[in-house]
Image (cartoon, rainbow, N blue to C red):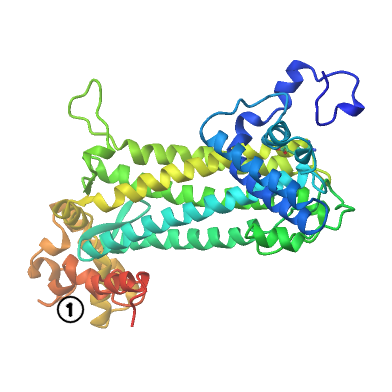
Amino acid sequence: SSNQQWGGRFSEGVDAFVARFTASIDFDRRLYRHDIEGSVAHARMLQKSGILSQDELSAIVGGLEGILEDIENDKIDWSIELEDIHMNIEARLTDRIGDAGKKLHTGRSRNDQVATDIRLWLREEIDQLGAELKRLQTGLVDLAEREADTIMPGFTHLQTAQPVTFGHHLMAWYEMLVRDSERLQDCRKRVNVSPLGAAALAGTTYPIDREFTAKSLGFDRPTRNSLDSVSDRDFAIEFCSVGALIMTHLSRMSEELVLWTSAQFDFIDLPDRFCTGSSIMPQKKNPDVPELVRGKTGRVNGHLISLLTLMKSQPLAYNKDNQEDKEPLFDTVDTLKDCLRAFADMIPHIESKKDSMEEAARRGFSTATDLADYLVRQGMPFRNAHEVVGKAVAYGLAEKKDLSEMSLEELAVFSDTIKEDVFDVLTLQGSVAARDHIGGTAPNQVRLAVKAARGEES
Ligand code: ARG
């Protein structure tokens, strides 16, 4: 039999394989709540504009509410023949309430309907993701406060560079997430416009009220051009690019967490409940959660490329290609949700191994720059100071001694301007405390950054 939605023009039903091939109900059914929300707003607008009677509106709204309940109680058999969530719900509505159900689609197309549904759905997901991102940020700030004085080696090229405070490192992560939050909110603005009323592509001949539906669905405004409305998926691409950057940041953090839990670094401990063991090696405690987050970054990056490629050659206006927007978008949201949750749950429970971190900072001649700066303060040009300290480091490497472990006599060999007070700058604590300016690693600055992050700055 021919499809009940468009049977009129057709002389045979759709091929069974083609029905399966073109159907999206298996994945777009997750839009059911937003599809119903959009339909209710559309029906109210039709009644207000004199296109539906009050009785028809009541029947439609009541019917849709009943369908919503059935879906939530898992009492619906989704039909492949009805292709997608939109036609499944509409057919069920007509089964329930009769002819009034057939009037719901007046002045509307699935093209503006699906664009509306995705935007409503994504807006809600953005708000949930934003809250989860904030929870992670709060966890980082709290941990940074506890670790404001903890010394660790800072790295460039993954070689020991200068001592930093662990709190400062954590606040660097926080900064990445601040930008992510801002990007998410900015993206939300372009998600939150209403394509409803664009109909198939050109608008509709009925006296519709697009301001009314936009407002009742909580959109900022109706979209401005009907052709663009049904074909625009920029907002989904933009969201996935925000998501790819969030994942990139979580992946960089993951990489450091994995390194730091190794016996070779031994900087931190992750709670056992975020790790797994080995089926053969009894000693193993593997940092699976950060490893998996790092790995999942690949799929989100992939989804961004999928969507860009999906759109790149599409002529205006709607094309069936667009049905392929959903799975990458859905999986991006799901992956982000899980990864942010994992991090927000885990970060507050990181235990720093302070002795081991400090020991590592001492091992890499991390205060060499401080010694050079000391010599400059005694009047030596910086390039000469660099050379002098380089020689002292070479001596230290041969003698297996950090600069702070050398006696004044040993140091004085390299420059007779070196005096007893040199040890004030050669200590790790002295080194970090001296970098006391906006954005510097001094514990004092970490505490100020924490305050600012909490909105407590005076
Ligand atoms: N399932 C379709 C999609 O996801 C809905 C819109 C279909 N419109 C059409 N003219 N075939 O894009």
Q: Could you tell me residue 419's position as x and y percent?
A: 12, 77
Q: Is residue 99 above or below residue 229?
A: above
The residue sitting at 34% across, 48% down in the picture is 256
Q: Is mark 1 within 8 Å of ligand 1?
A: no
Q: What quarter of the picture does the C terminus occupy?
A: bottom left
- Front position in the image: 60 or 18: 60
Q: Which residue is mark 1?
A: 417
Q: Quadrant of residue 31?
A: top right
Circle 1: is it few (<14), some (14-19), or many (20+) Cα within 10 Å?
some
Q: Nearer the viewer, residue 227 or 350?
A: 227
Q: Is residue 368 left or right of residue 10?
A: left
* Label 1: element kind: loop
The residue sitting at 46% across, 38% down in the picture is 296
Most extreme residue toward the front, as rendered? 55
Locate ligand 1 by image quadrant.
top right
Asked if one can make out residue 376 in the rendered structure from this viewpoint, the answer is yes
Q: Quadrant of the N terminus?
A: top right
Which amino acid, by three-letter code, is at mark 1?
Thr
Q: Is residue 79 above or below residue 35?
A: above
Instruction: From the viewer's perspective, tell me whether residue 297 is left or right of residue 303.
Output: left
Q: Nearer the viewer, residue 434 or 239?
A: 239
Is 134 on the left or on the right of 323, as rendered? left
Residue 2 in the image, given as x and y percentages of width and height: 83, 22
Q: Residue sitting at 67 percent across and 49 percent down?
A: 40
153 shown above or below 448: above
Along the viewing direction, whichever of 292 and 75 lies nearer the viewer: 75
Residue 401, image x and y in percent? 13, 56
Q: Residue at x 13, y 54 (%)?
A: 355
Q: How many marks?
A: 1
Q: Position of residue 382 (x, y in %)?
A: 33, 75
Residue 173 shows in this picture: no
